[in-house]
Image: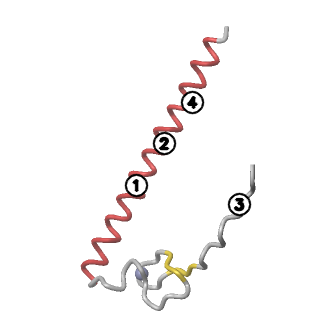
Amino acid sequence: MRYIPRPPQNPTRICDRCNLQTPKDSTDCIHCSNLSDIGLHDMLQKHQEQLEANKKLAHFFIIAAIIISILMYITTF
Ligand SMILES: [Zn+2]
């Protein structure tokens, strides 16, 4: 198997307006530069809701892994 190195990741910076990562070499933020203040608020609210949904999904998988581990442990005896 041949090793193919990954290309270096573009350096990023944190946007002062939306606090999300954006490429360092671009002057405008890729997330919020074309949004009004209301649009920014809506985008950040949706982003926060997505983070919460991801957190719930992670908890579900952790609990599923624990239950499967317990079942596997019980069935080995
Ligand atoms: Zn931004």
Type of the residue with mark 4: Ile
Q: Quadrant of the C terminus?
A: top right
Vertical order, 48 against 70 (above or below) = below
Contact (Cβ within 8 Å) of mark 2 with mark 1: no
State how far apart marks 1 and 4 are (Cα).
Answer: 21 Å
Extreme-top residue of the structure: 77
Neighbourhood count class around disc 2 (C-alpha, 10 Å): few under 14, some 14–19, many 20 upward: few
State how far apart marks 2 and 3 are (Cα).
Answer: 34 Å
Q: Which residue matches tag 3? A: 4
Q: Which residue matches tag 4? A: 66
Neighbourhood count class around disc 4 (C-alpha, 10 Å): few under 14, some 14–19, many 20 upward: few
Identified at 37% across, 58% down, the residue is: 50
State how far apart marks 2 and 1 are (Cα).
Answer: 11 Å
Query: Where residue 21 sits: x, y (%)?
Result: 50, 75
Circle number at residue 10:
none
State how far apart marks 3 and 4 are (Cα).
Answer: 36 Å
Identified at 32% across, 64% down, the residue is: 46
Mark in front: 3 vs 4:
3
Q: Which residue matches tag 2? A: 59
Considering the numbered disc 4 on the image, is that residue within a helix, a strand or a loop?
helix
Type of the residue with mark 2: His
Considering the numbered disc 3 on the image, is that residue within a helix, a strand or a loop?
loop
Residue 71: image quadrant is: top right
Considering the numbered disc 2 on the image, is that residue within a helix, a strand or a loop?
helix
